[in-house]
Image (cartoon, rainbow, N blue to C red):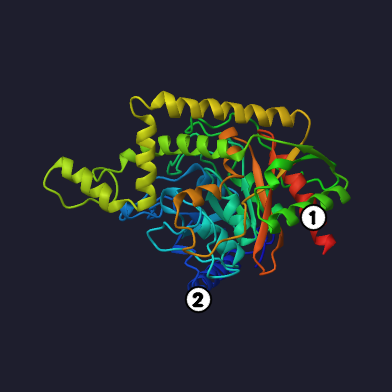
Amino acid sequence: MITLKEALTKSKNEMAALRKELEEKAIESGLNAYIGFESSGEGVPILIKDNIQVKEWTVTSGSKILQGYIAPYEATAIVNLKSKGMMAFGRSNMDEFAMGSTTESSYYGPTLNPHNTSCVPGGSSGGSAAAVAGGLAIAALGSDTGGSIRQPAAYCGCVGFKPTYGRVSRFGLAAYASSLDQIGPITQNIEDAAILYDAIAGYDPKDSTSADLETSSTAEQLDLSRKLTIAVIDNYISEASPEIQEAYTQTVAVLEKAGHTIVHKNMSNTKYDIAAYYIVATAEAATNLARFDGVRYGRRAVSENLEELYYKTRSEGFGEEVKRRILLGNFVLSSGYYDAYYLKAQKVRHLIRDEFTKIFDEVDLILSPVAPSVAPEIGSIQDPLEMYKSDMYTIAINLAGLPALSLPVGSNAAGMPIGLQLIGNAFDEQTVLDGAYSLEQSLKQSK
């Protein structure tokens, strides 16, 4: 597949032919990565996750409850994209309202992993990652609330970049957990990730959480010669599968050979990250999804009175995982439990951020697994708690609002991709991309 950097030099006619080719390939692949082939604007086609508003598109967040909804406005990320020679092309499949780690909870059915169609592509941006990895998209936008860009990128063998919270406007992104959500790129390589990130980043007065900071071109400033100090979290590795541990050890050796300094650190047990994240995220989700009631958006159930309208619309429109998280969120916010759960989770969140800050006083980056295993088979995870555990390495980054990038570092004996992530300090995307670029090139040379 042509890279984003290469595509930006092509003519309009060449891009029109490519869009037709991508649509045909997506249909023939049977991966169910695309759920629509709408297009908006001119330029290089970028696949858009189904929870990002594109004006006059059907945008459903992978849910039955939003069937029939037409976006009346454009997300700022899409406006920025179009101003940089790119266009929105196609809607990618996703876990319903971004709630999931496998893209199995989608109203449109599961997406398949291009490396093994019996396996999940990860989630919630599974459609975006599967399309990029499967050669069905040049690049894509996803959203990351607790790892939903990085984990599918790791499962599918492509690059997934979550910028610092506030770097990319959330205006036009369907809210799951407002203090955690962030739009970011999924691409074929690090350079493309920098190009797409540069295209969508920037301050937006329409987003009250947008960081009013200057941005510069990270793609133009990518520096292979930088020698960085990188922390490895020793107690994290023991929780991963043997094949992830082996890939991690080999990657550390590659980084050392490239001239980077490795230091060893420990962090709090990931069980605290999981507990804090799922309390905060579900509490915000219960509030954000209250707006989907059959009155203002999308699908409306047949009913005889207002109470029945609310009940039937939400019962019929939401899937099981969304209902589960709404119930949990309402529980932790309820009288008598708010202090015991929600406030305590916010205190733990503060401790997690302090822990990262302390480490970044000594290092430039942190190397971490993305998931404890390679992509599991479709249908193999029946217990929701097991699915939640697959986010153990990614959610702390969202709680702290930090940038992190997942890139492929190898594969297991069955040929399934293994990805690791580099985590950076807040608003230091350049260092994350420089470190990832160095690792990517070093891995190529070591093969």
Residue 69 visible within the image: no
- Within-10-Å neighbours for mark 1: few <14, some 14–19, many 20+: some
Q: Amino acid at mark 2?
A: Glu
Q: Quadrant of residue 226?
A: top right
Q: Looking at the rendering, in which quadrant would you find the C terminus?
A: bottom right
Q: Is residue 330 left or right of residue 246?
A: left
Query: Badges 1 and 2: C-beta atoms under 8 Å apart?
Result: no
Residue at the outermost bottom position: 28
The residue under label 2 is 28
> Mark 2: which secondary structure?
helix
> Mark 1: which secondary structure?
helix
Label 1 or label 2, whichever lies nearer to me, is: 1
Q: Residue 418: where, in percent of width, then height?
A: 67, 58
Q: Measuring 54% from the left and 32% from the top, which residue is drawn there? A: 210
Q: Is residue 87 left or right of residue 328?
A: right
Q: Residue 48: where, in percent of width, then height?
A: 50, 55
Residue 19 visible within the image: yes
> In the rendered image of this protein, does residue 256 appear above or below residue 353?
below
Q: Is residue 222 left or right of residue 205?
A: right
Q: Amino acid at mark 1?
A: Gln
| N-terminal-most mark, 1 or 2 | 2
Q: Measuring 36% from the left and 34% from the top, which residue is drawn there? A: 331
- Report the disc number at residue 250: 1
Q: Measuring 74% from the left and 39% from the top, which residue is drawn there? A: 365
Q: Residue 377: where, in percent of width, then height?
A: 53, 65
Give the alpha-carbon distance from disc 1 to disc 2, as whole Å: 37 Å
Q: Residue 66: where, in percent of width, then height?
A: 33, 52
Q: Nearer the viewer, residue 383 or 103?
A: 383
- Within-10-Å neighbours for mark 2: few <14, some 14–19, many 20+: few
Q: Looking at the rendering, in which quadrant would you find the N terminus?
A: bottom right
